[in-house]
Amino acid sequence: MNNPFRRFLVPGAPLYFVVLLLLSGVAAIMGQYVLAGVELAVTVIMLVLFRISTTRKKKEILRYIQSTTASLDTALRDELPLPMAIVSIANNEVFWSNDHFNQLTGLKPSTFSPKLETVLPKLSIRWLAEGKPECPGDYTLGNRRYRVLGSQIHSDQYDPSLFLATIYLVDMTELLQVRDEYIRSRPIVSILLVDNYDELVSNLPDGVVSSINAAIDNRLSAWTDGVDGLLRKLERNRYLFLFEAKDLPKFVESKFSILESIREVVNPSGIAATLSLGFGKDGATFAENYSFASLSIEMSLSRGGDQAVIKDRYNFTFYGGKTKETERRTKVKSRVIANSLSELIAQSSEVFVMGHKNADIDSVGAAAGVVCLCRKKGKQPHIVIDRQVNAAKELIAQLEQLPEYADAFMTPDDAMLLADSRSLLIVVDTNRPDQVESKPLLESIPRVAVIDHHRRAADYIEQVVLNLHETYASSASELVTELLQYAIDSKDILPGEAQALLAGIVLDTKNFSVRTGARTFEAAAFLRRTGADTVDVKKLFQNNLKDTLQRYQIIQRARLYRGDIAIAALDYTASRTIAAQASDELLNIAGINTSFVLYPDGDRVIMSARSIGDTNVQMILEPLGGGGNAATAGCQITGKDMNTVLHELIASIDKYFEE
């Protein structure tokens, strides 16, 4: 049904007169000429009365408006050069319009007040009802573009139920065209970085290195061909690319095809080149855009590289990044960070160590390693944790039995009272301010250090004095173990602390089955030499019979999606630890490479995700507000029911595979 026909069916005065004329015609056809004449006469009389009433009503309305605003008087004399009309907000009728409005729209005098949508199609006046003075966006009529302004007029004396408004059309065509061209020509600064260049050309002859460089240069030149930009090589693995904003959608639509193209460059050892792209836009100056691009590159590298990141004044946008991280850490960096962290600890009045909410064994284990480092520097640190809500109660109980940990654990409220301007806060196993154990404590302490292995999120902790953020590490405990190797003697590590660190590594690697590298085993061997008992570590992960049965009940509720994805959506609250274990257990089933477990917890839905294949669960949960890494991720969604969250998860999975 088209719009004119739909409008014709809406009850109104014109429809009634049409019906009366039809009835008169039917009577004449049936030979009832007297009745037809009477009906025609009544119709004409009613039409005349309606015309008189409408004219009087319009005059009274205009008289009232004219008495309340001087601007209308000017418009009535056609001294106002703007097209203007008076409309009813309630029924969208045009009560009056000046000659400029009539000439612009082709509106002609009529007995009936026309609807605004017939005069100005697709123009909504909802903004007027909301009290806004300007229509959002611009309005196109013919080949001209207008700004629509207006204001409400409400008569309490004449008719309390009548809401009128004046609207003005301001021709902004030339100005809007200049604005659009300005936006289209805004500069975009991009930094292109071959993020595994050292690994790519390591121990290769100069001729092979030259051919690899040429292959990379050719692909970058082909990718930027057709764009009015400037591509320059700054260093052996770093490029600067300047272009206009109008060309950015082309790259986005192609999903930054250069990421795939650059992987075709393979060295003789079979290592494929990977590229990180950082874009800065909407900055006030070139320098600010370059700063945004640098932040984008840093964000890309902290998330594993091989992806494009766009940074504007407010947000990060991510493209790509589905590949698994490869280990590219250096022991030099660990040694430098260990020395810097030792100096920060020595210069601080108080040291607080804090992990994420509902702290797990990796978070507590990494915190115990930091406590060991602080003790060597003569400081008594405090582990900030919620003693009631955590997933490492048994490990905490074991640590508290040690004399060195008698007063180590502290509530966030107590920490707030103790903190001062010279305090140091060390955040472990998270990089997001919304996920820390106590956000007020994070905001109150000026000096913050972060030690984390998860992919960096867009809302990461900023302005830190020290940042050890390695997405290639298996766990935060592994990172802290490496720091201890360079900062203190192995004999200074308590066996209980070594056991806590080893337990953290075991947890995040699923007993050394996922996300393990050579450095992971080196850290585990170091901890074993310092007194960690693998049997005691195993006992930390034991479950009672009741928890085991609950875990298998969750597994029974799992359903397959896309052939190799298991999704278990529960209608009851479960233990977070048991849900995570169920996610891990689902991966032990043949044919399942990815698992999701969802369960309600009060007004929120909690999700645990695992992967042992090529699927990056962090990228699937990130649009839903979650985070983690390629193999392990989690998410908490507040204010939505289970069915809504489940549909959003499936949509995110579909989008991930479609891209």
Image: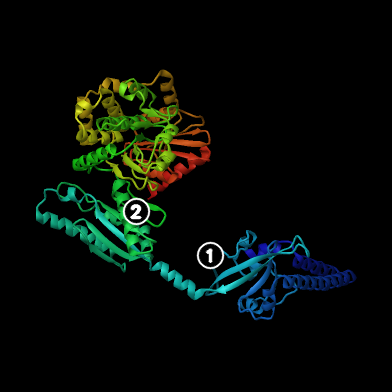
Q: CA separation, marks 2 and 1?
A: 29 Å
Quadrant of the image containing the N terminus: bottom right
The structure residue drawn at horizontal position 37% and vertical position 64%, both measured from the top left corner, is 245
| Numbered circle sitting on residue 309 | 2
The structure residue drawn at horizontal position 45% and vertical position 25%, both measured from the top left corner, is 553
Residue 33 in the image: above or below residue 440: below
Characterize the local packing of mark 2: few (<14), some (14-19) or many (20 or more) Cα atoms within 10 angstroms: many
- Left or right relative to 140: residue 311: left
Q: Tell me residue 564's x, y (percent).
A: 37, 37
Which of marks 1 and 2 precedes in the sequence?
A: 1
- Left or right relative to 15: residue 35: right
Please name the amino acid that badge 1 sits on.
Gly
> Which residue in the structure is indicated by mark 1?
137
Name the outermost residue toward the right: 34
Label 2, secondary structure: give it. strand
The structure residue drawn at horizontal position 45% and vertical position 45%, both measured from the top left corner, is 651
Residue 312 in the image: above or below residue 473: below
The quadrant holding residue 27 is: bottom right
Q: Is residue 595 visible?
A: no
Q: Is residue 193 visible?
A: yes
Count of number-bearing discs? 2
Please name the amino acid that badge 2 sits on.
Val
The quadrant holding residue 584 is: top left
- Left or right relative to 629: residue 9: right
Q: Nearer the viewer, residue 164 or 606?
A: 164
Q: Tell me residue 422's x, y (percent).
A: 34, 40
